[in-house]
Image (cartoon, helix red, strand yellow):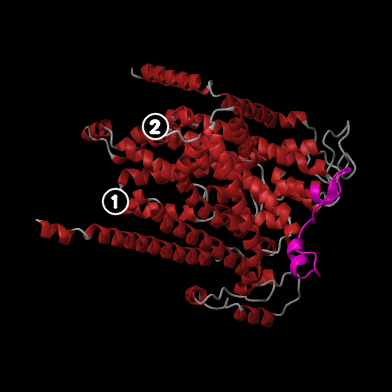
Amino acid sequence: MTTPLVWARRRDSLTRFWGTYRQQRTGLWGLTALLVIGAVALATPLLTDGDLRSVADAPGGPLEAPSGAFWLGTDQFGRSLLGLLLWGARISLAVGLLAAVLSVGIGTLVGVIAGHYGGWFATALMRVTDWFLVMPALVLAIVLATVMSRSLWTVVIAIGVTSWPTTARLVRAQTLAVESRPYIERAKALGGGHGHIMSRHVLPNVMPLVLAQTTLGISTAILTEATLAFLGLGDPAVVSWGGMLQDAREAGAVSSGHWWYLAPPGVAIALVAVAFTLCGRAVESVLNPRLGAVR
Amino acid sequence: MTATTAVVAPAPVDRKRTGYLRYGAGKLGGALISLVAVLVTGFFLFRIIPGDPVKAMTHGMPTSAEQLATLRGQFGLDLPLWRQFTDYCGKALTGDLGLSYQFHAPVGELIAQKLPATLLLTGTAVLLYSTLGLWLGTRSAWRHGGRADRLTTGVALTLWSVPSFWLGLLLIITFAVGVGPLPGLFPTGGMESGGERGFAYAIDVAHHLVLPVLTLVAVGYAQTLLVVRSSLLDEMGGDYLTTARAKGLRDAAVRRRHAVPNALLPTVTMVFINLGHVVAGSILVETVFSWPGLGGLFYQALSVPDLPLVQGLFIVFAGAMIVMNLLADLIYPLLDPRVRR
């Protein structure tokens, strides 16, 4: 009986959200860029032909300059760089998304639990969080990726388990703010248990923050993924933007001045990272109007 | 009444001092616990690795079972795990971080050799990008919302999103290898050409320093800029600024003498934290420019993988972060009386 009402309310708040978001010009640019990049990445199997992973029967000669046949030139095996770039987009986006979701998931869990329960357990949990916050995340991720086997999941885990503390801190603060409101007391009086309060009352209220954190986290995760792949810690079997840069460096593209091999992957990384950052900042300023007014 | 006041009066000063001491001791204790946690993590992280490190070390070389056993004894790998752990802790406390598989030299010695190069590179970079971030951030906040502000913030955010190693590679292609008519102006890597002495040597090192520092500054200054900008924006509405203007001070003087000193506080913390970060953050730039520092050493250790060396560098990088955070925590109350209470 209440369901239509709930849905109507959700639709209302979504419309309101979109209305405010639409006024953020940079946020709209970021969103448009992301939609285009996402569509291209999804359509890659239709746009390119053949399996680019096979090095044996590559169509072009090694390290060809951009031409009509190969718009961005070829790599040292004669594969089309444009094709590699498109396939790389899928890996970079997927890894970035998964790592950000993992990181924000851990952060939200830790933050809500620490904020809800309090006491010595929360103190211990926050000490651990602070410790992770102080650790140089990149070094920790590199070390994790070194000691585990080479695969995409390793990269996702290495990024995810090193980048959650900021989210945990933010979510904990928000949880404490939410829990001080009267309706939580009402829920408790009506017999709501810990699980009920955390999942039905606290979580929906920290969700907007979590969304903004995820958007911002993806751009960091994509950069870290590229870094790990560049250091040779990624999955050698798949094509990613960081891996392309490593290949380029190993093929001597730097000393021979083959800038067209090096430029596109970096531009792609920067473009996606900027787009996610713009979206994240726009979401942040919609949810936190004080911030929006200032920045 | 007067007697009691006379007795009580010095108390607040004393309390303030003991308050700071207690605060400092708390922070120091926290930092020590963090350092111990780093040591423990450093040990166990490298014991979850699958496979036999000795086999990896002698990979591809014909080795007898006796030689393997000798190697195990040499690196202490034949002892039970708890003995390895107590040995490791005891040694780490005296600065002994084990032997590198790759260089057959003590890890501590290798790190000490490479440290000055990293300090030179990162110190220069942090100094430059803090200054640049402060200068641009102040301008941008003072005229916020304007065209210049939007441009500065946009450029900084874009450069921040660029992978540092990629920027480094592009700079090498453009300015060291040379593109088209542009000749190579700077060396492609390393720290010195060799053979120079005295003043010529300093010039030579500075010449090698230009491109790596440029890369670090370009990627790093955005953070300082954004922090300076937002903390100055927080001060912008302050009544004391209106007062300063009402006194008839010029706009530049209001900014320089009244607004910026107040906005500077969060920046000081950040400079310290950056100093800690950048030691680790230079891994990529040092790798790309073959700079003979800790970052380059870390990369060399990763590709083997030379576990004792990776472990030692992990401890040094994490330790640097903890020490820098501690310094920031200790200095902050001295600069800002409001948080001393």
Element at badge 1? Answer: helix
In the visual, does A22 lie left or right of B5?
A: right
Magenta residues span: B175-204
Same chain shared by disc 2 and disc 1: yes
Asked if one can make out residue A53 in the rendered structure from this viewpoint, the answer is no
Chain where mark 2 sits: A
Q: Is A229 on the left or on the right of A113, as rendered?
A: right
Distance from the alpha carbon under mark 2 to that under mark 1: 24 Å
Estimate the x, y position of residue A210 in percent, counting from the top left: 46, 36
Kindly check if marks 2 and 1 are in contact, taking CB atoms under 8 A apart as contact: no
- The structure residue drawn at horizontal position 27% and vertical position 59%, both measured from the top left corner, is B13
Chain under disc 1: A
* Residue at the spot of label 1: A119
Q: Earlier in the sequence, mark 2 or mark 1?
A: 1
- Residue drawn at 30 percent across, 54 percent down: A120
Which residue is farthest front?
Answer: B248
Q: In the picture, residue B18 is in which quadrant?
A: bottom left
